[in-house]
Image (tube, rainbow, N blue to C red):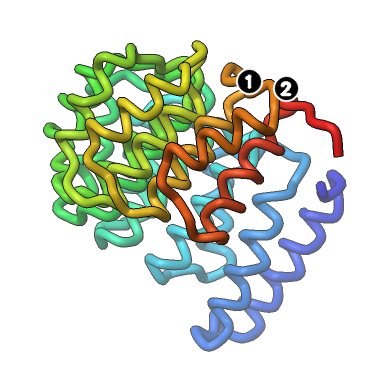
Amino acid sequence: MELDNNSDNEILNDLFHEAQHNNFNNDYEDYRADIIRFILKWSKNKIEINQLFEIFDKAGIKKQDQKSRIISSFLENPKNQINTQERLFKIIKQAKIDEEENKSGIIIEFLKIFKGKTDHNDLLALVKEINENEEYKAIAFNNFLMNSENQISLDTLFILLKEIGIKSHQYKSHAINTFFNNYKNQIKIAELPKIIDDVQGIEFKSIIISSFLRNFNEQINVEELFKIIAQSEIQNMQSKSSIIRSFLINPKNQIDTKEKLFEIIIKSGIEEEEYQVNIITGFLRNPKNKIDI
């Protein structure tokens, strides 16, 4: 959806008139902010930074949280590309946004929509602005990792996790999962135990192994699959079924017959029907696996 070149200006002018007529009544600020966010997100027009702040003034937008959401919508529109973290910091400073949650929202959105490669020092400078909130830092780092331009090595991944200050095993596992989901990031099977050992908790180990198996760009045989499961010491049947399902989904791991599939299920020791079905649906999702029905 896009607004045509005239309709967004007409709506904004009506909004400015309403704001002035009501003497910038704070009771309606959230309402005005919602309309501005919609316009900035869908407008066909490129909005300059000075126009953005003119909109704030004319519409009487003073709350930090509303300014933060509006700037995020401004960034979300591809026509309003901000290509350096210096320009982003300038916008945040000019908008007088200093509360952690509001500042974090803008930085997270910037890393989410930015199309170019982000220098590691720029990433650290951005995350530093988030201060000590590990959840926000983790979300920002995940958005950095999702950008296919940001190809990094496994060693760099661990260095950045440490420098950013992500210590929670939950957030670590999510970052590693996103690392694998970026098709440009590939590791060797021999490196997997190092990653698994760095994270505690069956659920989080399972997330990492599943993501690796789903995205690995080489074939893995069944013996290697069960070696990986054994090394992880995962006995939980739900986690084990998720790992096998991810292995089967990967088009590189073609299983020729349903008999081979049932051999895998038997070897896994999984007897619960629910988890067996989980494995079978993984097999069926792989377009290279063809069976007679």
Query: 200 or 273, which lies in front?
Result: 273
Query: 137 or 105, which lies in front?
Result: 137
Name the residue beneath numbered marker 1.
254
Report the amino acid beneath label 1. Answer: Gln
Q: How many marks?
A: 2
Q: Position of residue 110 (x, y in %)?
A: 45, 39
Label at residue 2: none
| Mark 1 vs 2: CB contact within 8 A | yes
Label at residue 288: 2
Element under label 2?
A: loop
Q: Assess disc 1: are there few (<14), some (14-19) or many (≥20) residues with their C-alpha within 10 Å of its C-alpha.
A: some
Residue at point 14%, 46% (across, down): 167
Distance from the alpha carbon under mark 1 to that under mark 2: 6 Å
The answer to which quarter of the image holds residue 117 is top left
Note whether 250 is above or below 22 in the view shown: above
Residue at point 22%, 29% (across, down): 195
The answer to which quarter of the image holds residue 78 is top right
Residue at point 50%, 20% (across, down): 183
Q: Position of residue 227 (x, y in %)?
A: 31, 25
The answer to which quarter of the image holds residue 18 is bottom right
Report the amino acid beneath label 2. Answer: Lys
